Amino acid sequence: MKLNKTKYTTKQLLAWLWKHHRGCRLQALLNAVFGLALVGLSLLAVDASRKAMDIAAHNLEGSILTMAFILAAIYIAELLVHIASTWVGAVLGVRTQNSMQQSFFSRLLKGRWSGVERFHSGDVLNRLFGDVDDIVKLMTEVLPSTLTVVAQFIASFVYLYAIDSELAIIIIATSPVFILFSRIYFRKMRRIVRKIKDSNSAIQSVIQESVQHKMVVKVMGRSEHMVSSLEQRQGRLRRQIKARARFSIFSRSMINIGFAGAYLVAFVWGLLQLDRGIITVGVLTAFLQLVYRIQRPLLDISRLLPVFVNSMTSCERLMELEELPLEDEVHPTMLSGSVGVRFSDVSFQYAKEGRMVIDHFTHDFRPGTFTAILGATGAGKTTLIRLMLALMEPTAGSVSLYTGDDSTLRPASPSMRTNFSYIPQGNTLFSGTIRENLLFGNPSATTAQMKEALHLAMADFVLERPEGLETRCGEGGGGLSEGQAQRIAIARALLHPCKVLLLDEATSALDTDTERQLLINLKSHFSDSTIIFVTHRLAVVDFTSDVLNMAK
């Protein structure tokens, strides 16, 4: 199987990591200090062990009991450093992770509509949790650990060189081979891990969609199909993990064989030196410990390599999110008086090669009018709303807002979006209480205002419930009928201060009588506002002042 090339160079990934390292620096610094402290303590333990052995063999004057106390103190100090390191990881680690998640979550919400929609929500969740966690661990744990490993290697080599320079050089001579192998390993493993992460995202996506549309799956009798689809993705993931495991096992086996051979050479060398009387038993003990402490950093690096690879792949996936174009940061501008929306020779297509969804469209939604937009599916009705809300920009032409008192045209933009309130198709309630859902429309709304909005939206049933506004609803309005959830969503939109009220099939789940009374309420209560109603129902026309028919 041919592996795909990675999108970013190592230099780009490292530059990105440095840019995002600022929020992690305190934890990373503390972990580095703890790691270096452990290196120093470990070398002190080696020296103390050497002296204790030589004292016991009568090759050195001193007290064994004193050396025992020194070793105990060193071990207690190591334990305290480990405890402090664990505490810092628990306290600062979650804060760092939350901060990074918040940063990318904010970017997703503030990104332009045309950029965010290309990512599946399941994939986005996988990146916000799994990939962010990988990056935080890399910056706060793995990189400080790498610094510790390098310090351990250098300090142990210097100590060993002072004891036996020839052996130190022999041991260090294997390093270039290890570094060359690491580069090959890193390059290949990075491609394999990218495929594994993409497969994990695909699995999360199919599970999320199946749960979200469970009723459709059950009614269509497609439960087995969705389970089979999940199994196929899981099978692909299993094969990829097996490929990673085979490569990892082979790589580590070769490294371990090499290090075992080097340790054996060092052991025999030390015995020969001892046999000739060149060194003492204590020196031999320190000698073997130092060889281990030189090899162990290299082994640790080999174990850290998969973490580096995994984290670099996570970097790539988060960098893709960061490339999402952001909307301009602007101050919301609420216009005074009645507001109209004017389309002037507007054309729009979703893809460069695609068809024109809207082609040379001109229309004036005059201030204070009630317009029904009719048309077949695909005629561009919802696209009109997205253009008004400046979620997308016209391919050609212009969309502008103006007031009845001032005919100055102001281009539709994110700053102008505050003049609109929007009720989309379907169930758009959040999990929580009905009060919380209504406050989403206007955080400063009073209980009296919420009750009035519910009354206008034909949702008085809420106040008849035992818990009233504190009634809880589940994900997607769970516990409510479609019609009830839709009316609460309408009440939420009515609470939002606006000049233009947009309704996109907002009464599709209501019966005829309820819809009729709702339209009467809207017309009487929002007589100064501009109301734009996308609908398939011809009965709505009877309540409107203007009708716009859109041909497909």
Image: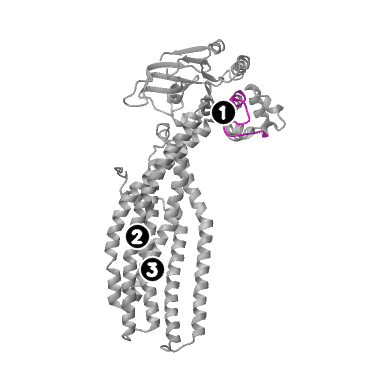
Q: Position of residue 173 (x, y in %)?
A: 27, 68
User: From what the image shows, is residue 408 above or below residue 272?
Assistant: above
Assign the N terminus to one quadrant of the image: top left
Taking the image as shown, residue 453 lies to the left or right of residue 284, namely right
| Mark 2 nearby-residue class (10 Å; few <14, some 14–19, many ≥20) | few
Q: Nearer the viewer, residue 291 or 475?
A: 291
Tag on residue 253? Answer: 2
From this view, report whether residue 338 is shown above or below residue 265. Answer: above
Q: Residues within 10 Å of mark 3 (few under 14, many from 20)?
A: many
Q: Nearer the viewer, mark 3 or mark 1?
A: 3
The residue carrying mark 1 is 497
Identified by mark 2, the residue type is Ser
Give residue 64's position: percent from left, percent from top. Answer: 49, 85
Q: Position of residue 164 (x, y in %)?
A: 31, 78
Q: Secondary structure at mark 2?
A: helix
- Disc 1 secondary structure class: loop
Q: Residue 156 lies in magenta, yes or no?
A: no
Query: Which residue, given by chain and number where applicable, does mark 3 sit on?
Result: 152
**Going from the N terminus, do you reach mark 1 or mark 2 first?**
2
| Magenta stretch bounds | 470-486
State which tag comes first along the sequence, 2 or 3.
Answer: 3
Residue 513, percent from left and from top: 63, 14
Q: Are marks 2 and 3 in contact (CB under 8 Å)?
A: no
Residue at 33%, 57% in the rendered image: 251
Residue type at tag 3: Gln
**Cα gap from disc 1 to disc 2, whole angstroms:** 67 Å
Q: Is residue 78 above or below residue 448?
A: below
Q: Is residue 318 visible?
A: no
**Residue drawn at 28 percent across, 66 percent down:** 174
- Alpha carbon of mark 3 to alpha carbon of mark 1: how far? 64 Å
Point out the tag, 3 or 1, that comes first from the N-terminus.
3
Is residue 516 in view? yes
